Image (spheres, rainbow, N blue to C red):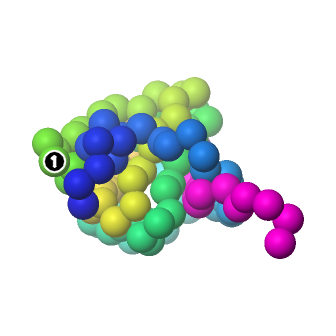
Amino acid sequence: MDCVLCDRLELPADLEVVRATDTWDERTMPAGLRRVHRVAAETWGRIRVEAGTLRFRAQTCSAVEVVLRAGAVQAIPPDVEHDVEPMGAVRFCVEFLRPAQSGLG
């Protein structure tokens, strides 16, 4: 995907939250999040770390690895391979965003 915002892990301005996960911790997070996976095409993800520390890796044009601490928010571009790893106790959720719908039908 050729997307400058994707490579910089920045959310576009015209997105709205369409759903959010439960809040997970290091024990309750789905095992699939620890393996490389992707957010669906045309859908962005946003990790919100409530407490603790989470490592985030993304295979953008230049691979990215960041440590997210309590209060951190991390964008996840559509169709980009990524994984997360708890670094001890952590609480976080993931929101899914899509382009805002214009007009009222």
- Residue 20 vertical position relative to residue 32 in the rendered view, above or below: above
> Which quarter of the figure is the N terminus placed in?
bottom left
Q: Residue furthest right?
A: 104
Q: Is residue 20 left or right of residue 78?
A: right
x, y percent for residue 77? 39, 53
Q: What is the magenta range?
A: 89-105
Residue 19 seen in render? yes
Q: Report the front residue among 83 and 25.
A: 83
Q: Is residue 51 left or right of residue 33?
A: right
Q: Check disc 1 and report the residue beneath it.
A: 61
Q: Residue at x 30, y 60 (%)?
A: 80
x, y percent for residue 48? 57, 41
x, y percent for residue 12? 50, 43
Q: Report the front residue among 87 and 19.
A: 19
Q: Judging from the image, what secondary structure is the residue with disc 1 in?
A: loop
Q: Amino acid at mark 1?
A: Cys
Q: Is 55 contained in the magenta span?
A: no
Q: Report the front residue among 94 and 91.
A: 94
Q: Is 94 contained in the magenta span?
A: yes
Q: Residues within 10 Å of mark 1 (few under 14, many from 20)?
A: some
Count of numbered circles in the view? 1
> Which quarter of the figure is the C terminus placed in?
bottom right
Q: Residue at x 40, y 46 (%)?
A: 86
